[in-house]
Every structure is written in C-alpha cells, then in structure tokens.
Image (tube, grey):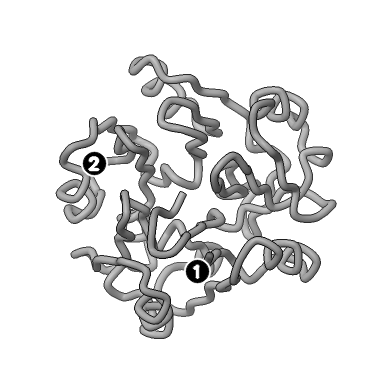
C-alpha cells in the first residue's frame, strides 16, 4: 500500500505511517504558493478506482504512480499560484457523491463522476475542509459545507478549525489533518491538543483513531491511501 502525504510531518509520525505502507512525501516548488505546495489534496482528486492528477504535477510523482501501477488520469487545468487556480482538484468523492465547487472544478472530475450526485459548495478548498468517513458521514470545518450536506440528509459534524496549524495562516482545516483507510482514521497530531478533540472522538466512536504523533493538529493537505491501484480515500 502507498501513502501520499506532506513532508512536514515530524520523523516520529512518518515512522508510524510506515507501519501501514510505503510513504511518499510530496514536495513541489513554484507551482502553487508555499503554504500548500506540499499538499496532496491540491494536486490529486481521488475518484473511484482512478486518481485525477493536475497536469503540472512534477514528473517524478507521475513516474511513481506509473511504477506502482496506480491508475491516474491527468486533468485539464494547470494549477497556478493564486486562487482559484490553486483549487481545481480540491474536491471530495464518495461512492455516491461528488462534493465541491463546481464553478471552478476541473471538468475531468465532473465527467468521471457522472454517476454520482453532485453537491455544489461555495468553499473551493473542499477536501481541506471536509473529511469523508463513509458515503453518508463527514466531518467539516466549514459552515457552508455543513449547511449543504445537511440539506442532503447527510450526517455531518462541524468543528471549529482554531488550533490547527498551517504555516503562514491563522489556522488550517480539519479535513487537511486527516486520512481514512478502511475503519481507520489517521490524524496528523493528537486530539488531546485540539479544543474540540473529545467531540471528534465521540463522533468517531465506531472507527479506530490513529494519532500519528503527540502534538497539535497539522494541516498537511490530507493523507491519501492507495491499495494495489484501488481507491484513494
């Protein structure tokens, strides 16, 4: 299994992740602004058994995907240094839903997700702000996303993002701190250091929580898992 995440992780967290698979640490320069230049959810959108990748993802990572036989399709829009060109691929997909800002989303995502119900949200950094736990259960740090998902009768927990670390910003977002594989939720940090940590623990009571190090939550741009070319979550 391959795991793609951000190279700002403390060494102890990377070591713990390696117990679950081969870790690929993303690092780019000069494509998007520095604070998100190592964020997988900026460069990739998981979609079923395929990964939609920004066409200007560095070749070294395209080669890794090909070598590992991970199915990927290049999108149409190249990422840029300023919004909205930083958010073309920052969407959330589940078995039955595609959630994101459809006004800027790359068309390849919409085309590949044609059998899913599309939920438009104004928050273009959707994956940063939304963690899909299942097809009908989510955690978000964006009130607009919370409102739209409730309209669709989906179970959603809102948590304030204060206390989540993202260098250069007041705070990061909860979705960007996490990844999910099977019944395991991986968190970049410890909920003991998050003001709403106990509320999150209660919401995740049916899942196994893997806290990757004892420290504040880090917005690392998501932790993406791949199992033998199947689906990233």
| Residue 100 lies in quadrant | top left
Residue 69: image x %, image y %?
36, 73
> Residue at position x 39%, y 81% from top?
67
Residue situated furthest front in the rendering: 228
Residue 20: image x %, image y %?
65, 61
Q: How many marks?
A: 2
Q: Is residue 21 left or right of residue 43?
A: right
Q: How crowded is mark 1: few (under 14 residues within 10 Å), some or many (20 or more)?
A: many
Q: Is residue 10 left or right of residue 84?
A: right
Query: Is mark 1 in CB contact (under 8 Å) with mark 2?
Result: no
Vertical arrangement, residue 156 with respect to residue 221, above or below: above
Residue assigned mark 2: 102
Q: How crowded is mark 2: few (under 14 residues within 10 Å), some or many (20 or more)?
A: some
Q: Depth check: 49 or 4 in front?
A: 49
Report how far apart the C-alphas of labels 1 and 2 lie in the structure.
23 Å
Of labels 1 and 2, earlier in sequence is 1
> Residue at position x 73%, y 42% from top?
163
Residue 74: image x %, image y %?
24, 68
Residue assigned mark 1: 37
Vertical arrangement, residue 203 with respect to residue 114, above or below: above
Residue 133: image x %, image y %?
52, 35
Q: In this view, does 140 lie to the left or right of 152?
A: right
Q: What element carries label 1?
A: loop
Q: Depth check: 82 or 115 in front?
A: 115
> Residue at position x 47%, y 33% from top?
134
| Residue 68 lies in quadrant | bottom left
Vertical arrangement, residue 203 with respect to residue 181, above or below: above
């Amino acid at each position: 299994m391959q795991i793609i995440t951000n190279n700002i992780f403390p060494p102890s967290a990377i070591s713990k992740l390696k117990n679950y698979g081969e870790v690929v640490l993303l690092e780019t320069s000069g494509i998007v602004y520095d604070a998100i230049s190592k964020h997988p959810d900026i460069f990739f959108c998981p979609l079923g058994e395929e990964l939609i990748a920004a066409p200007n993802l560095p070749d070294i990572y395209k080669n890794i995907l090909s070598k590992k036989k991970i199915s990927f399709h290049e999108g149409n829009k190249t990422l840029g240094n300023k919004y909205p060109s930083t958010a073309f691929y920052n969407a959330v997909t589940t078995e039955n839903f595609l959630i994101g800002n459809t006004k800027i989303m790359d068309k390849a995502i919409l085309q590949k997700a044609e059998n899913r119900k599309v939920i438009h949200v104004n928050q273009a950094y959707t994956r940063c702000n939304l963690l899909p736990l299942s097809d009908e259960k989510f955690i978000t740090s964006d009130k607009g996303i919370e409102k739209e998902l409730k309209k669709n009768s989906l179970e959603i927990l809102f948590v304030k993002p204060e206390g989540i670390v993202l260098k250069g910003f007041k705070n990061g977002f909860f979705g960007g701190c996490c990844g999910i594989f099977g019944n395991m939720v991986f968190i970049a940090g410890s909920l003991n250091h998050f003001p709403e940590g106990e509320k999150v623990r209660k919401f995740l009571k049916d899942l196994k929580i893997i806290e990757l190090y004892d420290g504040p939550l880090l917005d690392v741009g998501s932790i993406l898992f791949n199992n033998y070319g199947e689906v990233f979550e």
